[in-house]
Image (spheres, rainbow, N blue to C red):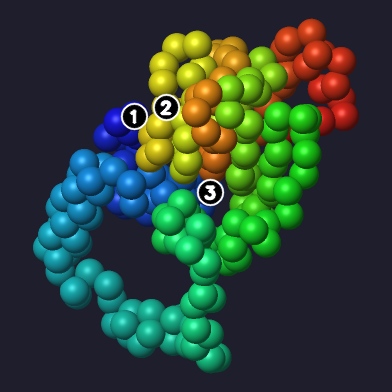
């Protein structure tokens, strides 16, 4: 399985990743036993390091201040009930982040082949999207102005370099120009986290780039 680097898993375990990137790692880890075990090990090591810090180091009244700073939720809202398709395809971290069924997500057609659904994120510089690519069809050739993370939820794709299937985590940096093709046997559903808009580089891409933000 394609996994995040240990460095990224460590950043995740220590809470250092921006929320949209953490969402992608959590979504992948829900589908990858090995990444999940690595994260648990890192969290355990981090926790034991924290235990060694002397409580006196916090200073007087620090605990009172810390407790006062914890916001008490006004009311427990029960988690929404999801339908069978959403339960089967969307791992819990992403499901809870989206907060609705796949069938109720607002899709926008980018072409006859690709549709995209924006998921509101509180971190402004990131775009969080679901991408749906028709079986056996390509996404336009593009590069990235920033980091692009793709976690495959259903089906798979090949980007000319490698195959990616359910659970796989792909980090594409700005130097990569690629053209993912969905596998021929079924439609491909992915979570895509972009640190900046992608840039379309193919002929059609150059024609439509000003009007389309994938
Ligand atoms: Zn890409």
Ligand 1 within 8 angstroms of badge 2 C-beta: no
Q: Nearer the viewer, mark 3 or mark 2?
A: 2
Q: Position of residue 9 (x, y in %)?
A: 31, 41
Residue 78 vs 30, above or below: the answer is below
Find numbered disc 1 in the image and state the secondary structure of the residue it sits on: loop
Q: Closer to the camera, 51 or 35?
A: 35
Residue at numbered disc 3: 20
Q: Quadrant of the C terminus?
A: top right
Label for residue 2? Answer: 1
Q: Nearer the viewer, mark 1 or mark 2?
A: 2
Label for residue 164? Answer: 2
Ligand 1 within 8 angstroms of badge 1 C-beta: no
Q: Position of residue 12 (x, y in %)?
A: 36, 48
Q: Nearer the viewer, mark 3 or mark 1?
A: 1
Label 3, label 2: how many angstroms apart (C-alpha)?
Answer: 20 Å
Q: Position of residue 14 (x, y in %)?
A: 32, 52
Q: Residues within 10 Å of mark 1 (few under 14, many from 20)?
A: some
For the point 51% across and 17% down, which residue is it? 159
Q: Earlier in the sequence, mark 3 or mark 2?
A: 3
The image quarter containing residue 206 is top right
Label 1, label 2: how many angstroms apart (C-alpha)?
Answer: 7 Å
Left of 33 or right of it: where is 167? right
Q: Residue furthest front?
A: 185
Find numbered disc 2 in the image and state the secondary structure of the residue it sits on: strand
Q: Earlier in the sequence, mark 1 or mark 2?
A: 1
Residue 125 vs 44, above or below: the answer is above
């Amino acid at each position: 399985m394609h996994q995040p680097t240990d460095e990224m898993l460590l950043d995740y375990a220590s809470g250092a990743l921006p929320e949209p990137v953490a969402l992608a790692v959590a979504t992948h880890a829900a589908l990858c036993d090995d990444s999940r075990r690595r994260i648990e090990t890192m969290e355990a090591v981090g926790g034991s390091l924290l235990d060694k810090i002397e409580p006196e180091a916090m200073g007087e009244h620090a605990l009172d201040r810390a407790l006062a700073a914890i916001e008490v939720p006004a009311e427990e809202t029960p988690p929404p009930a999801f339908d069978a398709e959403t339960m089967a395809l969307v791992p819990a971290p992403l499901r809870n982040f989206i907060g609705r069924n796949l069938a109720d997500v607002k899709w926008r057609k980018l072409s006859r082949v690709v549709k995209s659904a924006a998921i509101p994120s509180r971190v402004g510089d990131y775009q969080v999207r679901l991408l749906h690519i028709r079986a056996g069809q390509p996404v336009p050739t593009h590069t990235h102005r920033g980091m692009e993370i793709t976690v495959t939820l259903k089906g798979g794709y090949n980007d000319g370099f490698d195959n990616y299937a359910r659970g796989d985590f792909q980090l594409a940096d700005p130097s990569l120009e690629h053209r993912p093709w969905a596998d021929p046997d079924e439609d491909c559903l992915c979570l895509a986290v972009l640190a900046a808009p992608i840039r379309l580089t193919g002929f059609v891409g150059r024609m439509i780039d000003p009007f389309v933000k994938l």
